[in-house]
Image (cartoon, rainbow, N blue to C red):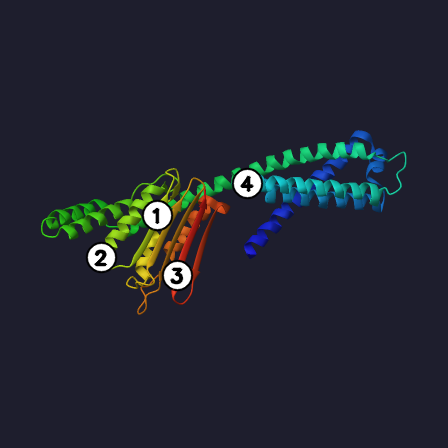
Amino acid sequence: MLQTVKKQWKQILIILTLYTVWSIAVFLFLVRLQGLDITLKQFGTGNQLYINFIHTIIKGAVLYYILIYHLIIPLIESRKWKTIIPQGILLFVLLTVYEYVWNFIIVHPEPTSIDYTSPKVFFITAACLDFLIILISYFVATLITSNEMRKHKEELEREKLKAELSAIKYQINPHFLFNSLSFIYTKTLKSSPEAAHAVHLLSEIMSYALDDWDEMGTVPLAQEVEHIKKVIEMNQIRFSHNLKIKYYEDVQTNNAYIPALAFVTLVENAFKHGDLNDDKNQVSIELIATKSKVYFLVSNKKKTGPKEPSKGIGVNNVQQRLQLMYGIKHSFSIKEDENYYLNEIIINL
């Protein structure tokens, strides 16, 4: 929360500084172009000059801040035209009303022939300026968004590299590992088909975990779902098919991509820390995927007795990768009390 406030103040200060420099440059340009006397007639003299100048800077900085960071950037990221466009229209209506009150009631309550601007000319000028402000704001917002996307991509690549290095650090030579599993599978196939099948599942799960993903570290949702089912089946074999698991799936799209192992990690955590033998409080896994949204939920009752050590690295990794990949287009909720634990992920595609 504190970091968000600091970030917002930093954004405001940057815009305020840039707009102040721009306003001073425009004022000096007008002085050079038309002379000091004419410019002062337009802006006022003495205290009126300072008031008008400060008013213009503060108003412009606030307007650009709202437009760039609260309207246009969210519009570029989410494409929620129906929500954001009316907000923009309302903003400019309020701005025009404010400008009218400032110019015709506060500054010039009794207009003279020298400085009087008719309401008709005022509204035409305001409309043209509003259009120009939108163009400038959209251009700046596009630059900011492109820069943020580049940074996110670079950070994703760094995270992917760290994951690969960690895998190298902690794994035995994978060729030796898979050759050994293949040997065990062959030897146990006739004497114990179920054990052989478990070895085969383990081999596929580990192969998936060590796979070479794309540059963003993502996989098709269907591929992740396939390995969730293998993890469930593997654990059922481990516990003689006595685990109490409720699994629901409704996948209506094949176009969704998610960070590899994101859902698998949460399922494995449920098996690691959950009470797997309670009929009334089964481990619940729910996946719903449409063309516009992916919803994933894992919940479990906590097991009693000695707890397996955990540093929360897996969950933190999932959170970071989802944030880097989807930003405001996703939510990751963790709900926990003394007896229950729940993870809920919503991704807007």
Q: For this view, does 327 lie left or right of residue 216?
A: right
Q: From the top left corner, tell me how far across and down residue 300 is, in percent.
A: 35, 60
Of labels 1 and 3, earlier in sequence is 1
Foreground pick, 125 / 34: 125
Residue at 69% from the left image edge and 40% from the top image edge: 92
Q: Residues within 10 Å of mark 4 (few under 14, many from 20)?
A: few
Amino acid type at circle 3 is Tyr
**Element marked by disc 3:** strand
Q: Are marks 3 and 2 in contact (CB under 8 Å)?
A: no
Residue linked to disc 1: 249
Label 2 to label 1: alpha-carbon separation: 20 Å
Q: From the top left corner, tell me how far across and down residue 162 is, in percent.
A: 37, 48
Residue at 30% from the left image edge and 58% from the top image edge: 271
Residue at 24% from the left image edge and 55% from the top image edge: 236
Label 4 to label 1: alpha-carbon separation: 28 Å
Residue linked to disc 3: 341
Label 4 to label 2: alpha-carbon separation: 47 Å
Residue linked to disc 2: 241
Amino acid type at circle 2 is His
Q: Quadrant of residue 280?
A: bottom left
Amino acid type at circle 4 is Lys
**Element marked by disc 2:** loop
The nearer-to-camera label among 4 and 1 is 1
Residue linked to disc 4: 80
